[in-house]
Amino acid sequence: MTTRIPAWIKKVGLILIGFSALALVLGRTVDSKKWIRSQLAVPRGPGGWLFALTMPMFHKVLYSPAAEFLQLRPDDDLVEVACGSGVFLKEHAAHVKRIAGLDMSDIQVGLARRRLRHQISAGTAEIVRGDAVALPWEDNRFTAATCLGTLEFLSDPVAALREMKRVLQPGGRIVVTCGIDENDEDCVKETEWWGFPHPSEAESRKMVEDAGFSLVSITYLDDDYPARFIQGVKPE
Ligand SMILES: C[S@@+](CC[C@H](N)C(=O)[O-])C[C@H]1O[C@@H](n2cnc3c(N)ncnc32)[C@H](O)[C@@H]1O
């Protein structure tokens, strides 16, 4: 006796076989970890959309602590370097006087501009495409600055921090994340498996001090993602 396989099962089976074959071919021809690292560094191309849209899900754990450490006030003029799709600016900083974001990825800039379109039309927000090491703003413009989940991926993080200091007013606050808690062995192992950079506490503190910030302090997130937050102040 023969059993008939329903047509929909055949279709689903064929799709699964097709995807598995594609994954096998890609797995052999592409260094997938390297590709993921490059997309996390700067989302580009069709795959970049996936990273740009999902990145805030992984980074949202950083946003509330960052806003808290920045002690944002209604009269603040805030800049976020490497702002991604603008979720932090929209959801945690919309109450300040003015917000500005900069990112190198066209995809991220497009998403952030769309997310913040009402504030942009009202003249209280601007999103620009650019490089963290050459910010397009004048000296002493902002009262607070941040950069989340990005600094360790930059080729010259101190140059980016110097730029953040240049555009901050004297007394302006900076809050950045850089690296993870080195005492969290599981997180260190996972980070190394992915090949992500993870500067030590001393190295990341030195970056912020070398850029010219004072009152530098370090706090760790007590979470699945034990990110290292670094706070500093531009000397008066
Ligand atoms: C890991 S994502 C973090 C994005 C965002 N901060 C968030 O929390 O979702 C890194 C971001 O840095 C941006 N980026 C990388 N290098 C940059 C550079 N040199 N200047 C400006 N943005 C840069 C990327 O385009 C990407 O949006």
Image: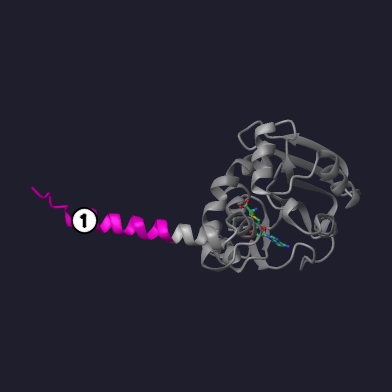
Q: Quadrant of residue 158?
A: bottom right
Question: Which residue, as the protein is rendered here, is positioned at the far front?
Answer: 1
Q: Is residue 82 left or right of residue 234?
A: left
Q: Is residue 227 left or right of residue 111?
A: right
> At which x and y percent is residue 207?
85, 49
Three-letter amino acid code at the position of disc 1 = Trp
Q: Quadrant of residue 199?
A: top right
Which residue is nearer to you in this view: 34 or 1? 1
Inspect the magenta stretch and tell me whether residue 106 lies in it.
no
Q: Can you say whether 219 is above or below 26 in the image?
A: above
Inspect the magenta stretch and tell me whether residue 4 lies in it.
yes
Residue behind mark 1: 8
CA neighbours of label 1 inside 10 A, class few (<14), some (14 to 19), many (20+): few
Q: How many discs appear?
A: 1
> At which x and y percent is residue 32?
57, 56
Residue for point 73% across, 49% down: 197
Q: Is residue 190 left or right of residue 164?
A: left
Residue for point 23% across, 56% down: 10
Magenta segment's dominant SS is: helix
Q: Quadrant of residue 102?
A: bottom right
Which portion, as a residue range, is magenta?
1-21
